């Protein structure tokens, strides 16, 4: 058909639009959850004692963390997903076995599901100990400062450097990690997700430093993740972010001690 887009371009557009839609839904849920949480907690203001973590609330907290991770991580992982889709498309064109890109994305999100479970457990522990309140806000300046300091120092560690390098090199990852079949695609996504967790988990812990459901703070961390994964100058950005977070952590702790 005259004027029709070539198949590779058309499929990239569909892939990008699909990921953008999932991301938009995740951001919409995150914003709605933050708004709803504020209303519920306002209604509960004045009640004594912590809110119980029964099965329903625990599941809701896990869902909140998982959807928030989807909203924050999907924008930066598009080049990796696009690389997988391109190789699968080439294999299909050459009549070789291929699988849908959804299996790779599913494996990637499986890794972040594991992180979300750990974050939910940490959330419960911090709230139970009084270090964050039922509004999901930090009650400890020292905790907030320590989290910023830890996130800053982590930027200089070999683990951060290795994990970030695997997140920034889609072709290199595909060449070294390729596995055939649906299970192989899931394992590939899981391994890429594990590198991504290793790269970003400490940054994500900063959500406990200010307020877990502060949408502006969630957006700011998303921008940081995109900067260090997508922009040229990996070493510069990794060190610049590390220095900024380290200084912020030290300043926060000093201010807390002097208050």
Image (cartoon, rainbow, N blue to C red):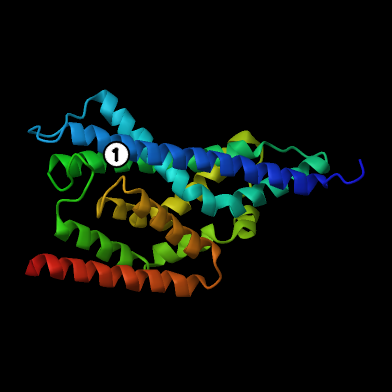
SS at circle 1: helix
Is 252 in front, or is 118?
252
**Residue reaching furthest to the right:** 2
- The quarter in which the C terminus is drawn is bottom left
Residue 241 % position (x, y) = 38, 69
Is 5 in front, or is 42?
42
Q: Quadrant of residue 31?
A: top left
- The quarter in which the N terminus is drawn is top right
Can residue 251 be seen at all in this image of the molecule?
A: yes
Vertical arrangement, residue 113 with respect to residue 166, above or below: above
- How many dots with numbers? 1
Q: Residue at x 36, y 40 (%)?
A: 65
Can residue 66 be seen at all in this image of the molecule?
A: no
Residue 156 % position (x, y) = 37, 70
Q: Quadrant of residue 119?
A: top left
Bin the neighbour count of mark 1 within 10 Å (Cα to Cα): few under 14, some 14-19, many 20 and up: many
Specify whether 58 is left or right of 132.
right
Vertical arrangement, residue 18 with respect to residue 214, above or below: above
Q: Residue at x 48, y 40 (%)?
A: 109
Q: Which residue is mark 1?
A: 120
Q: Residue at x 45, y 42 (%)?
A: 27
Q: Quadrant of residue 58?
A: top left
């Amino acid at each position: 058909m005259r004027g029709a887009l070539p198949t590779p371009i058309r499929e990239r557009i569909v892939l990008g639009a699909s990921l953008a839609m999932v991301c938009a839904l995740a951001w919409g849920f995150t914003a709605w959850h933050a708004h709803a949480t504020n209303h519920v907690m306002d209604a509960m203001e004045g009640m004594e004692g912590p809110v119980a973590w029964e099965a329903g609330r625990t599941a809701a907290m896990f869902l909140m963390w998982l959807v928030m991770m989807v909203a924050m991580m999907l924008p930066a992982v598009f080049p990796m997903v696009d690389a997988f889709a391109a190789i699968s498309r080439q294999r299909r064109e050459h009549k070789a076995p291929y699988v849908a890109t959804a299996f790779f994305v599913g494996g990637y999100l499986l890794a972040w599901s594991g992180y979300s479970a750990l974050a939910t457990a940490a959330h419960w522990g911090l709230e139970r100990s009084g270090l964050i309140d039922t509004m999901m806000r930090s009650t400890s300046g020292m905790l907030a400062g320590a989290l910023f300091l830890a996130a800053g120092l982590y930027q200089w560690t070999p683990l951060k450097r290795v994990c970030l390098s695997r997140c920034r090199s889609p072709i290199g990852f595909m060449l070294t990690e390729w596995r055939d079949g649906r299970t192989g695609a899931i394992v590939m996504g899981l391994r890429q997700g594990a590198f991504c967790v290793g790269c970003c988990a400490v940054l994500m812990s900063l959500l406990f430093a200010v307020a877990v459901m502060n949408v502006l703070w969630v957006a700011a961390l998303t921008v940081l993740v995109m900067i260090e994964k997508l922009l040229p100058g990996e070493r510069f950005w990794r060190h610049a972010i590390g220095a900024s977070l380290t200084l912020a952590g030290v300043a926060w702790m000093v201010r807390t001690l002097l208050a």
